[in-house]
Amino acid sequence: MLNPIPSGSKVGIVAPSCALDSPEDIREGLRWLESSGYRIVLGQYIFEKNNHLAGTPEQRAEDIMRFFADPEIKAIIAVCGGYGAQEVLPLLRYDVIAQNPKPIIGFSDTTALQTAVFTKTGNINYAGILLKYDFKNNSRIHPYTADSFLELMNGHFQEVSGGVCVNGGTAQGRLIGTNLCVFELLAGTPYFPNLKDSILLLEDVDEKSYRIERMLTQLSQHPTFSGVRGIIFGQFNDIYLNHPDDKDTNQILDDFARKHQIPIIKNFPFGHVRARKSVPLGASVVLDADNCRLKLKL
């Protein structure tokens, strides 16, 4: 079961990656969180700038650790992705994090934080929303994304149906991911997880197709990849060909699935899209690839 973070809870807001252009970038997102009943606590350095990053690695780590050490803070929400979270990883106190489990919420570059914390502590994190991305230009969050996120915050993860079956079968394991590029950049570091008995959820955006193929090849050569029980490919948006003869994304995913005969689905409703399902990373899940369904293992 998932621990609920009900309306009325305090949530910490951090900027672990790129800098915000202006406080206006997250004004609408903060208003929405407050209207949903959450009590907002901003990180001390959330509006700092260090070139294109949100302050120094030490400042970003300090905000994160302050919220982990504060028992009144029930979740930590990232404002945006981009790049930079990996710099913070050596500066975190994983013993403190393990003693004060609470989800880090975000996606894209937040994958680095979520993966490292899971690897070091086993804590569950939520691949959910990003305040700048989901409220871009002060727009409203997509209703599907909002409902899914609030459902997860309340401790519920209903069965998700979506996508296309590539390899049939049923598998169960810990859900790990999500951004393929960021996830792969952790390989060979102390922050990359053992993939034994895992279900991978992978997506990416704004890449050349051959790079997607290259990253998946590297992933398949990881020493613990043989322990992967199933794979969920989410949305791969704005993927373009470097050469007319290059494979497109569908060909790459289908070829990968033929080489690895485990349950695999693609086009799952997660990724750099406005309508996105929030999922509990690190939780035990069951993938029914024949029916393209994902649910918690009870």
Image (cartoon, rainbow, N blue to C red):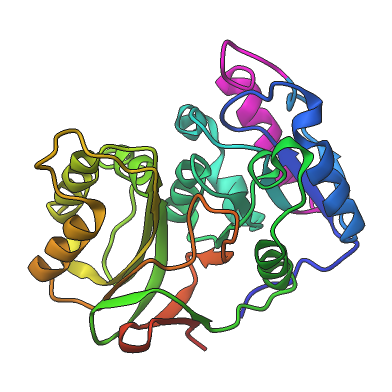
Q: Would you identify the image quadrant in which residue 124 lies? A: bottom right
In the image, is residue 64 part of the stretch drawn in magenta? yes
Pinpoint residue 180: horizontal percent, then vertical percent: 34, 48
Pinpoint residue 256: horizontal percent, then vertical percent: 15, 61
**Is residue 72 visible from the viewing direction of this image?**
no
- Image-based side of 146 in relation to 6, left or right: left
**From this viewpoint, which residue is outermost toward the front?**
244
In the image, is residue 230 part of the stretch drawn in magenta? no
At 34% from the left edge and 41% from the top edge, which residue is drawn? Answer: 181
At 47% from the left edge and 65% from the top edge, which residue is drawn? Answer: 282
Pinpoint residue 170: horizontal percent, then vertical percent: 30, 87
| Region of the chain picked out in magenta, as a range | 48-74
- Image-based side of 265 in relation to 141, left or right: left
**From this viewpoint, which residue is outermost toward the top?**
51
Q: Would you identify the image quadrant in which residue 257 lies? A: bottom left
Vertically, is 261 above or below 176?
below
- Image-based side of 60 in relation to 35, left or right: left
Vertically, is 287 above or below 125?
below
Vertically, is 54 above or below 243?
above
**Is residue 218 visible from the viewing direction of this image?**
yes
Question: How many numbered markers are drawn?
Answer: 0
Where, quadrant-wise, is the N terminus in this rendering? bottom right
- Image-based side of 250 in relation to 180, left or right: left
Vertically, is 71 above or below 86?
below
Q: Give 201 or 235, whichever is nearer the viewer.
A: 235
Pinpoint residue 237: horizontal percent, then vertical percent: 41, 48
At 18% from the left edge and 47% from the top edge, which residue is drawn? Answer: 213
At 48% from the left edge and 34% from the top edge, which residue is drawn? Answer: 89
